[in-house]
Image (cartoon, rainbow, N blue to C red):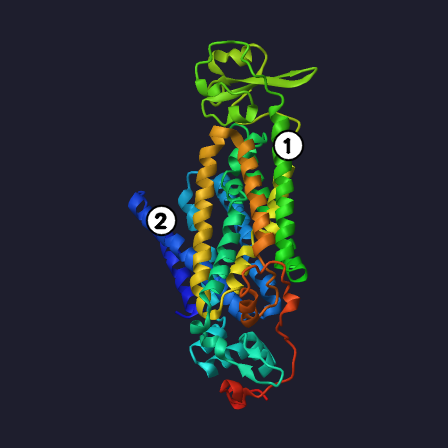
Amino acid sequence: LERKVSILFSIFIYGFGLILCVMLKTPSYTLLFVGRCLCNFGFGMGHVTSLVYLLELTPSYMRGKILVANQMVKPFGNSISGLVNLAISKSVGSSQWRLMLGSSLIPCALQLLLMLPIPKSFKWLYTKDKLEKSRKEADELYTDLTSYQYKALLDLNVKEDGESSITSKKRGSEINPSVVRRMVTVALGLIIVAQFSGFSAVMYYSVQVGHTSGIGNGDDSTGVFLFSEGIFVANFVGVLISLLLIERLGRRKLLLLSQIGTICSIALIVAAIFIVDDMAMSDDPWPTVVNPDCLVDTCTACVSQPACGFCQFNTTLGSTGFCIDGNSSLSILGRCEDHGGSYCSTDCHSRSNWFLVLSMISFVIYFSLGLAPIPFVIAAEIFPQHLRDMFTSISVSTYYSMTAIVSLVFGELYPVIGIKYVFVLFGAMTVIGLLFVILLVPETKSLTPETMYELFVEPWCCGRESSEYHVINSHASDEDDEILGISSSSSGRD
């Protein structure tokens, strides 16, 4: 299917899945399952197709900005969705999940209407030998488009004498398998590196992270929600900075900056948790602990156990305490409260809590600066046209698979080893990812598919800058359209 048709179809599938989820008054688990599967299918299809579509419409010197802008919309949408759900929850009650889920039909319908007048992908039409249609769609999108600029948009290899190489349109037989393997290694490797930095775990478990920081205690769901909104805002700010810098610094430098900042932020998070845990006593002054899960000596490990809580005392020497069994609001037999302690099963009251929050915000901003958008940018632009659909789909599928794996692993490790050592693990994985980028990831800014192919011919392509290769010149005089088999009259331009 053509790109525009595929996106419209994905919107229809997503909207139909939403309707299935909310249409019945009596909940049906089967219908909910089918509806959610359709929603996820439509979302995934739209995600892949939109990346390829934007890449095909965009000049090479704007590729990074456009694809990063596409990634920037996601945290903005998440934040708006959260605000809408909060408003619905506060006005009609949190049990109205159908209304919350059904509200997604509004942007879905809006997107469907806005997609109708947009042009088709002229590059896709060109690869299907629909030359006149391709030029017509390009002229609808770009005003006063010269023939040279049109060829540049098609990523044709325009030679100095004015001739164009059209072999890139169907060069599948010329592609060296080892080159494709290196491209796949870089594309999928970046996706995996980004996910193992732990960002998905922070997003999905922001409630637990907020509780550890003392945010949203008890029934205060608004505090946790505001913390989650802060995470989304930090994500948006980081991607916005990336949008401003990606065509100046390039992909590789921005990735390295993002990874170094992420590693430093993880170190600050671990340091903040160490400070919180430093106030814990190793022994319970009242013996006979009922639950063996409460035999821990740190606050964060204590509150991660569902049947335990931290009994805290404030003295002239500072805060101290120990882990004790109990429920969500009261220690067992009231032992902590009877002796003047403050019992909490969800967080650790420490003056370093806000240090932990600020470190977490720094982590999100630095991650969003490069590790969030750039893997998708590189995965979408390094492959030749005839391979781009397949490998962009594989990259996005890898992203969602790794998101599920990291989130599940975090959920299992968090109560076992504590959040502190989980972040130590994420930091170690990010250091390995930094080495991966240094050794294997080249700079791809402003490269054409022809020069991108040359970039990956060498087994070790790191350190090669885009300045060593030819880039597309977007400003040149008009050339003879006959090279492309398109007459000047067909485009309506001289």
Please give the name of the residue rendered at 59% of the width and 49% of the height, measured from the top-left corner.
435
Total marks in image: 2
Distance of label 1 from label 2 (alpha carbons)? 44 Å
Residue 80, horizontal then vertical, whole percent: 54, 49
Q: Residues within 10 Å of mark 1 (few under 14, many from 20)?
A: some
Badge 1 element = helix
Name, please, the residue furthest toward the front: 459
- At label 1, the amino acid type is Ala
Of the numbered discs in the image, which one, if any, rests on residue 271? 1
Asked whether, in this view, residue 267 is left or right of residue 296, the answer is right
Viewer-nearest residue: 311 or 149: 149
**Amino acid type at mark 2:** Cys
Which one is in front, 299 or 42? 299
Task: Locate residue 171: give its quadrant.
Answer: bottom left
Q: Position of residue 139 (x, y in %)?
A: 54, 79
Q: Local crowd at mark 2 within 10 Å, few (<14), some, or many (≥20)? A: many
Please provide percent x and percent y for residue 154.
Answer: 53, 75
Q: Nearer the viewer, mark 1 or mark 2?
A: 1
| Label ID, residue 21 | 2
Q: In the image, is residue 196 above or below residue 3?
A: above
Quadrant where the N terminus lies? bottom left
Dot placed on the residue nearer the N-terminal end, 1 or 2:
2
Image-based side of 280 in relation to 105, left or right: right
Q: Is residue 443 above or below residue 136?
A: above
Q: Secondary structure at mark 2?
A: helix
Residue 494 as seen in the image, left or right of residue 305: right
> Could you tell me residue 91's position as x and y percent?
49, 41
Note whether residue 321 is visible. Answer: yes
Q: Is residue 117 above or below residue 410?
A: below
